[in-house]
Amino acid sequence: MAQQVQLTATVAESQLGQRLDQALAELFPDYSRSRIKEWILGDRVKVNGKTSNKPKEKVLGGETVAIDAQIEEEARWEPQDIALDIVYEDSDILVINKPRDLVVHPGAGNPDGTVLNALLYHYPEIADVPRAGIVHRLDKDTTGLMVVAKTVPAQTRLVEALQAREITREYEAVAIGTMTAGGTVEEPIARHST
């Protein structure tokens, strides 16, 4: 069953020049910027009584904005007691060390037994955060650190930071075979065909 969302606010003068989607994300921090952008593109947002479907539209400050939308119920995944290696935690985020052979999201071929299922078990409140707070993923065969948002505002900020490349990712690879001393491998990284 869909949840009805009806919100109204006034754009602050300090938001002059911001994109509409950015201004709305600040005004309504319980909703992700991507969800707000969906609503704008779906003609669910009005600015001063007129429908606006342009996320990049600049605001001037003082406008009355209204959202009349629905949130479709997302697929419900089952919490599962799967151990998580938490290397950092505060009230907004978790950093987990994902082991090899653990899939991040349920999907075809892996309907359960994932990081997402484990998060729902250990942090039931994270069910209210889009994608259970997962803002990036690592392949099944990859070991490494993952940042997970515990709240919607933290998830929104992490997604924005990733998109703005404010968060850097570093990878180390293991090469199999005989390596000569020195040198650089400059080849693109791609999915394995299997």
Image (cartoon, grey):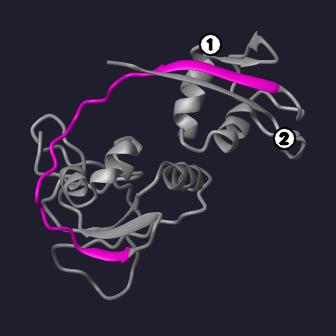
Q: Give the position of the N terminus as an image quadrant.
A: top left
For label 2, the residue is 12
Q: Is residue 135 left or right of residue 78?
A: right
Q: Relative to 72, is 22 above or below?
A: below
Instruction: Residue at 58% x, 50% y: name it.
Output: 160
Image coords of residue 4 (percent x, y): 47, 20
Instruction: Residue at 76% x, 35% y: name it.
Output: 19
Q: Is residue 115 left or right of residue 81?
A: right
Magenta stretch holds residue 70:
yes
Image coords of residue 51 (percent x, y): 72, 12
Local crowd size for mark 2, using a 10 Å CA cut-off: few (<14), some (14–19), many (≥20): some
Q: Is residue 60 left or right of residue 100?
A: right
Image coords of residue 173 (percent x, y): 29, 71
Image coords of residue 76 (percent x, y): 22, 34
Q: Residue 61: which disc?
A: none
Instruction: Residue at 60% x, 16% y: name it.
Output: 44
- The span shown in magenta is 64-88
Instruction: Residue at 78% x, 27% y: name it.
Output: 57
Q: Give the position of the C terminus as an image quadrant.
A: top left
> Tag 2: residue type?
Ala
For label 1, the residue is 43
Q: Quadrant of residue 36?
A: top right
Q: CA distance from mark 1 to mark 2?
A: 22 Å
- Work out which residue is located at the far bottom of the displayed protein and give it: 181
Q: Relative to 105, is 2 above or below?
A: above
